[in-house]
Amino acid sequence: MSEDQKTVEPVVIPAAPARPEEYDTATRAALDHIDRQAVRTVADGRLPSTRRSYAQDWVGWTKFCAESGVPCSPSPPARW
């Protein structure tokens, strides 16, 4: 090795957890916050008539599920 060359030690960075439930509390909280902001940003860009239409669609979907025994998602979307 010449005088101009320096030895570089490798840096080992642990892999990120494969599943969200493996993230630490602070990371989960940050990701939840980002998710809520994203939902709010998208919803705020929708016209009131669109939000009303989505709400009506949700009512129709849950009625269909109840009458036909089809499981529907556990909760309605956070915001239309």
Image (cartoon, helix red, strand yellow):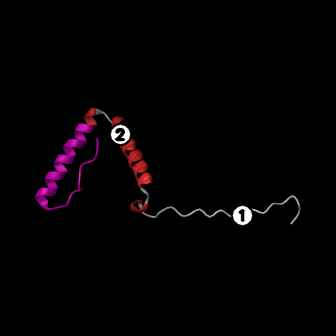
Q: Nearer the viewer, mark 2 or mark 1?
A: 1
Compare residues 53 and 33 and report the one nearer the observer.
Answer: 33
Q: Is residue 11 magenta?
A: no
Residue at the spot 44% in from the left edge and 53% down from the top edge? 27
Q: Main secondary structure of the magenta part?
A: helix
Residue that sits furthest to the bottom in the current view? 1
* Mark 2 crowd level (few <14, some 14–19, many ≥20, 10 Å Cα): some
Label of residue 40 in the image: 2
Q: Which residue is mark 1?
A: 9
* Mark 1 crowd level (few <14, some 14–19, many ≥20, 10 Å Cα): few
The region drawn magenta spans 51-80
Residue 45, position as x, y percentages in the image: 36, 35
Compare residues 33 and 80 and report the one nearer the observer.
Answer: 33
Q: Amino acid at mark 2?
A: Arg
Residue at the spot 11% in from the left edge and 57% down from the top edge? 67
Residue 36, position as x, y percentages in the image: 36, 44
Residue at the spot 35% in from the left edge and 39% down from the top edge? 40
* Cα–Cα span, label 2 and label 1: 45 Å
Residue that sits furthest to the top in the current view? 48
Identify the secondary structure beneath mark 2.
helix
Residue at the spot 34% in from the left edge and 35% down from the top edge? 44
Query: Is residue 51 shown above or below 26?
Result: above
Compare residues 32 and 64 and report the one nearer the observer.
Answer: 32
Query: Is residue 43 shown above or below 63?
Result: above
Identify the secondary structure beneath mark 1.
loop
Query: For the C terminus, which image quadrant?
Result: top left
